[in-house]
Image (cartoon, helix red, strand yellow):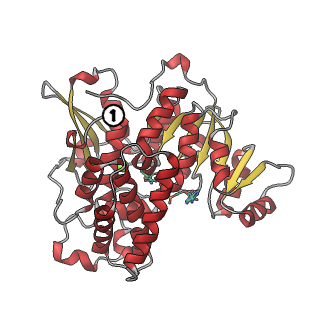
Amino acid sequence: MIDYISPLPKAQDLPSFPRRLCVLGATGSIGESALAVAADHPGQFEITALAGARNVTRLAEQAARFRPRYLAVLDEGGAKELKGMLPAGYSPEILHGPGAYVTLAALPEAQVVLSAIVGAAGLPPTLAAAQSGKVIALANKESLVLAGHLIRRACRESGAVVLPVDSEHNALFQSLAGHSGDDVDHLILTASGGPFREWPAADLASATAAQALKHPNWSMGAKISIDSATLMNKGLEVIEACWLYGLPQERVKVLVHPQSIVHSLAAYRDGSLLAQMGQPDMRIAIAYCLCYPSRLPLKIAPLDLAALGTLTFREPRADDFPCLNLARQAVAESPGHCVALNAANEVAVEYFLKDRIGFTDIARAVSWALDRQQGLDDPDFMTIMEVDQATRSAVAAYLTGTT
Ligand code: NAD
Ligand code: MG
């Protein structure tokens, strides 16, 4: 039984074209792909707002190209620097600080908000977009992991619509469209298995950040690349699917599919499996969300199944990559555990990227944080932020040996 997170309006009730977009995380991998889609389809979108964090040079280039009325960066210094880089005669409003992203997400002028900030920092603007009744193209899976219950409630109150950008959830969205949710038995998320898919378990402790960043099929930001290597990305995606589709985690299965062509499958009670297939290129899912329910002709090579020849599937190595089951454990326990899981993971990934801890220490830190977390069934926003902060401090102390 599927109980989708938000209302799904009819096509005529969705914003007409050109759609006015707010792009949060514009300078990241997803943000860049979204702007590439917009650049390739003149007349379909107006860019109302662009937000980045510290890469002010890139944001200035994007702003000069798309001329949004609003820009946001992380701090005041960045805002000043950005102002100095803009072309003469173009003077947008430049906001800064975490509150700036919330302001942009709720702008009355913006109709569609692409939520593509990485990590828990994406939650406040995503929630603001949900409270403001926006169409949300959601890449920031962490916001559902932290506060799926609050986003679900906000969408139902405001009429906001969530469209999943994450390729697996986008595939499920497409595979469920037009069918009765009552006929669905379970969902199957596919996973590439990451760069260490074939590594012997004994070698994982010595895996380096540089090795983990080399994803076999997708080009992505650093944090999600490490999450893919540990299988935490698939764990976060199980939780994301639970909140999007209203299912318990036992009904969200995972299969390793090294070719990343079948992006996920919906299993119906008559034994049918419906899947969405495509090149591993995020522009497909992004464009689907930005234009929903219509589709754009994209400049992507057609999928040549004969050239691929073989598609393979197998069970994940859950014992060697414990993060997947740690995420299952967290969502089965309580929303508070999901906050702790995410915070511990973000800290551990940051340490791993700086070569301060080993690859297998990431799962160790997350497991430690889950063991000390108390159950919280319906945490409000402030409580979520408190658990997030408390877990970050505790895990940092644990990893640096001061606990
Ligand atoms: P990225 O690291 O390439 O980009 C992150 C963006 O967020 C950048 O624009 C950065 O400036 C901004 N940012 C970082 N910290 C910030 C902060 N504290 N406040 C405001 N902005 C901040 O990441 P990405 O790979 O584009 O991923 C973005 C999100 O999309 C993540 O939640 C990820 O899980 C999800 N996602 C990404 C992919 C992918 O293919 N890259 C696929 C599915 C889902
Ligand atoms: Mg994904």
Q: Residue at x 40, y 43 (%)?
A: 378
* Residue 43 or residue 113, whichever sits in front: 113
> Based on the displayed image, in which of its 4 quarters is residue 372 positioned?
bottom left
For disc 1, does the CB lie below 8 Å from ligand 2?
no
**Side of 53 relative to 202 (left or right):** right
Q: Residue at x 78, y 63 (%)?
A: 80
Position of 210 relative to 7 (above/below): below
**Side of 323 relative to 106 (left or right):** left
Q: Horizontal and vertical percent for residue 308?
A: 24, 48
Q: Residue at x 34, y 52 (%)?
A: 236
Q: Residues within 10 Å of mark 1 (few under 14, many from 20)?
A: many
Position of 400 relative to 388 (above/below): below
Q: Residue furthest left?
A: 271
Q: Horizontal and vertical percent for residue 144?
A: 42, 45
- Residue 134 in view, yes or no: yes
Q: Horizontal and vertical percent for residue 93?
A: 78, 48
Q: Residue furthest bottom?
A: 401
**Side of 264 relative to 210 (left or right):** left
- Residue 118 in view, yes or no: no
Q: Amino acid at mark 1?
A: Tyr
- Count the labels in the image: 1
Position of 20 relative to 325 (above/below): above
> Based on the displayed image, in which of its 4 quarters is residue 321 positioned?
bottom left
- The residue carrying mark 1 is 245
Q: Secondary structure at mark 1?
A: helix
Q: Residue at x 62, y 38 (%)?
A: 21
Q: Horizontal and vertical percent for residue 117?
A: 53, 53
**The N terminus appears in which quarter of the rendering?**
top left
> Based on the displayed image, in which of its 4 quarters is residue 355 positioned?
bottom left
Position of 318 relative to 397 (above/below): above
